Amino acid sequence: MAKSVTYSSTRGCSTQKSISFRSAVMRGLAHDRGLFVPDSFPTVSPEELESWRGLNYADLATEVIGKFVQEDEVPRDILAGIVKKSCAAFRSEEVTPLVKVDGHYILELFHGPTFAFKDVALQMLGNFFEYFLSTGSNGGRLAVLGATSGDTGSAAIYGLRGKKGVDCIILFPTGRVSEIQERQMTTVPDDNIHCVSVDGTFDDCQDIVKASFADKEFRDHVKLGAVNSINWCRVLAQTTYYFWSYLRVTDLEKDVKKVNFSVPTGNFGDILAGYYSKRMGLPVGDLIVATNENDILHRFFSNGEYHRENIQKTISPSMDICVSSNFERYLFHLSGDDSSTLASWMSAFESTGKLTITGDLLSKAQADFKSAKCDTTQTLETIKNYHTKDDYMLCPHSATGVSALHQLNTADSATVALATAHFAKFGDACSKAVTPLPEIPKELSQLWSMETRKSQCPNDAKVVQKFMERKIEERTKKHKQRDEKKKMITNLLLVSAAVGVVAMIVSASKRR
């Protein structure tokens, strides 16, 4: 039997090496604060890739994920069921349809439950969690702690709501997500979902998550797990739409041999999936990192300076990030998969806020990725131009990706821009470029009539941890009481039925 790929921490701790897919998914963040990366990369030959051309999205995704996850981890029929169930949550039969606009392609990643690209990965992650918990992991319990700059939160909530044994706590920065993003999170009534508004920035929320994973006593007590893009499952799930879009482009463009991708980038997880797809053998040309004014990644790929700066609040809030948590995975590969080098880089960065590379390392990084920065003025111009000329609406994040491919002169039939969210999630921003806005989907418009619930916490990891423990205890107690009540009712019904049977037997014997 073929063996599944194993995973090790970027920071090299001996206890965090060669672990299984199940363990990597359930842990999320390695216990040495590193991120899990594959110990090897499976390859896809040109012949195998061509054999996948006629598959629907779910079957193709099963093939791609199955290169990493073999029968020894998840039986193939179970894997196919998890993927199929995840894809069934999307409004489009194609899951991520491809459209041609203004001479290039746009991959629409917003047809899931929360109208954002993160639904692709988080529907799958939620279903993997459910399978692993039902087959012995963590004693059937998991407490998910996530930070969101807007879309991860709602996608995680919709992927985990109602899941048995799972508590989901999502932190978001007060006043720094769009109103509709907040409503998507706070209108979900399931009692395993807890939305927490934190006084601070997204990076503050992310730091609370990382500090909680570093706290062994807390981590083990609550059975802590992660849904942010630090979780390997999310990156793996996102590789599937790079394969899908490559096949769809080359269906239509017979002379295209390699496909370029322009990706709105904040935490680096989405474009990292493209990088890994390329390493697997997918014929990928340029990978374009598109940023807004929070351009730490553009500065890195331009001059080698990964220097932390204060966050600027923009109209593309999901990209308002000054430290990209997934970037550590790429830095690990840039170092030659040298965990000692990576650990020293991250230690220096965490103490000084600066990491600088030069020479051959910078040249290698620039060969792997191109980049462009798109400010608010350019974002609004792009939204307006595409609506005016092509009757196509872009969200502010998607517009940065489209602007980037124009800046780099790759707006052609061999290039795909990833559309990461539906424009209606950012109506206030889009209305600065287009008025009146097109009608928004009913699934979003109805949010305004629904009740909301959320909690408030200061920017303090210990306070958040105590909040989590309290909510988990309350829900566990509530469910225990409910289960005991159900058991008591069941026993009463059984006793009543038994009494009835005895009465019938007695009555029958008397008639004799």
Image (cartoon, rainbow, N blue to C red):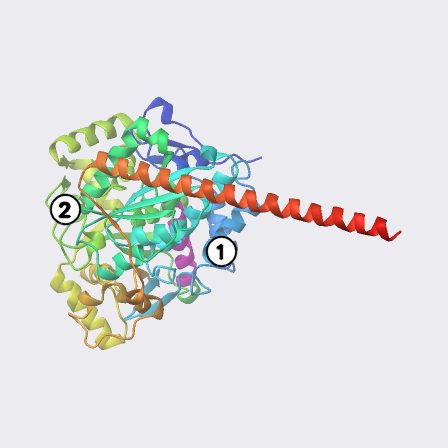
Residue 36, how many percent across, how many down?
A: 35, 35
Residue type (three-letter) at the residue carrying disc 1 = Ala
Apparent side of residue 510 relative to residue 51 in the rendered image (left or right): right
Is residue 257 depicted above or below 211 in this figure?
Answer: below
Q: Position of residue 140 (x, y in %)?
A: 47, 37
Compute the Cα span from label 1 to label 2: 37 Å
In magenta, the rendered stretch is: 235-250
In the image, residue 512 lies at what x, y percent? 89, 51
Element on which disc 1 rests:
helix
Q: Secondary structure at mark 2?
A: helix
Residue kind at label 2, given as amino acid type: Arg
Q: Residues within 10 Å of mark 2 (few under 14, many from 20)?
A: some
Q: Nearer the viewer, residue 38 or 178?
A: 178
> Residue 116, located in which quarter of the rendered image?
bottom left
For the point 39% across and 60% down, which residue is it?
112
Q: At 23% across and 53% down in the image, what residue appears? A: 318
Instruction: Please say whether residue 276 is visible from this viewpoint.
Output: no
In primary-sequence order, the first of circles 1 and 2 is 1
Question: Which of label 1 and label 2 is nearer to you?
Answer: 1
> Which residue lies most toward the top here?
14
As drawn, the residue found furthest toward the right would be 512
In the picture shown, does residue 401 fall above or below 449?
Answer: above
Q: Nearer the viewer, residue 97 or 217?
A: 217
Judging by the rendered image, the residue that carries numbered circle 2 is 299
- Residue 448, x across and y down, in percent: 28, 66
Q: Residue drawn at (18%, 65%), measured in percent from left and top?
A: 429
Viewer-nearest residue: 428 or 250: 428
Q: Which residue is mark 1?
A: 58
Decide if residue 386 is on the left or right side of residue 472: left
Q: Is residue 237 magenta?
A: yes
Q: Are marks 1 and 2 in contact (CB under 8 Å)?
A: no
